[in-house]
Amino acid sequence: MNKQLSFREDGTFTIVQFTDVHWKNGDGKDARTKSLMARIIAEEKPDLVVFTGDVIDSLHCADPYRSFRDAVGVASESGIPWAAVFGNHDSEGKTSREELMSVQTSIAGTIAEYGPSDIGGVGNFVRTLVGRDGSSAAALYFLDSGAYSELPHVPGYGWFQRSQAEWVRKKAGVLQADNGGRPLPSLAFFHIPLPEYRDVWDRQTCFGKRYEKVQAPRLNTGMFSALEQAGGVMGTFCGHDHVNDYEGTLYGVRLCYGRATGYNTYGRWRFRRGARLIRMREGSESFETWLRLDNGDKIESQRKHSPNRFSRA
């Protein structure tokens, strides 16, 4: 599917971010997850659905590719455009990102693309939003943040490759040139938080909760720098850490966690499953965001966190 994304006549464009669905084999917990997603889509009526990784728990799926179809089925059946970026649990064992992307691009409604074959990851692509005058008015970056470190002496999770950061810079330059030299207001979606998610919690006022340490990669290969230098990037959205949902602004970029969606994975007592909503407005260099929880609550104002010198990520 190559459907053009467009701002509405009222100048808005609304995105629902589901993250860490962790679909397995369609059991009762998966059914609860599906019901939650369907209800939020019905209530919020978004213009785009984005899954920010760990759509499935591939090691525990009898058929990971079927499980992926089932996990995104609620988005596909809604008739609303959708896309998924991959997380570390999507392609474990014999499950490959390439095969998952083949599945994703075969499902109705997807706007996802394989992306360039000469840079790191699978599914790096950018889509523009058309304004009411028919010209490009904003951009959305979808990025593969990797899975696990492949270096024995560097433990932990994977990281963006430098080739991906350079690709972002180049794509932003092309979009800016096509826009008369003005950067397009943009958002970026990926799974594993950037190291700067630690920095923003330690250094800046944030809003929301951090109930676990930021599980960012040990190496920093400059993706935040690339997004910052691209110009126009208003915010980034990740998942991965299931009981973090905060957002804070670092050097003009709002770093946001989603709200973990899936019931078939770890959580925290009284930390409800849900989703993050993002609303862009044509011509604006900012966005609105709120949470929708499984009890129906809409959280528009989150708890304030002020940094101090004892903070540790």
Image (spheres, helix red, strand yellow):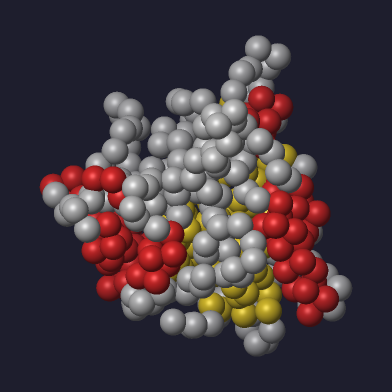
Relative to 283, 140 lies left or right: left
Relative to 95, 173 lies left or right: right
Q: Residue furthest right?
A: 181
Q: Is residue 33 above or below residue 284?
A: above
Residue at 14% from the left image edge and 49% from the top image edge: 27
Relative to 114, 201 lies left or right: right
Q: Position of residue 184 (x, y in %)?
A: 73, 68
Please state, as top left, top right, bottom left or bottom right, where the N terminus lies in the image: bottom left
Q: Position of residue 101 (x, y in %)?
A: 42, 67
Q: Position of residue 289 (x, y in %)?
A: 53, 51
Residue at 62% from the left image edge and 74% from the top image edge: 128
Residue 125's quadrant in the figure? Answer: bottom right
Relative to 154, 31 lies left or right: left
Q: Residue furthest front?
A: 152
Residue 189's quadrant in the figure? Answer: bottom right
Front-lying residue, 94 or 114: 94
Residue at 32% from the left image edge and 42% from the top image edge: 273
Q: Is residue 103 above or below residue 212?
A: below
Residue 75 in sight from this viewpoint: yes
Q: Is residue 4 above or below residue 155?
A: below
Please state, as top left, top right, bottom left or bottom right, where the C terminus lies in the image: top right
Q: Residue furthest left?
A: 28
Residue 257 in sight from this viewpoint: no
Front-lying residue, 275 or 119: 119
Residue at 31% from the left image edge and 33% from the top image edge: 266
Q: Position of residue 2 (x, y in %)?
A: 49, 82
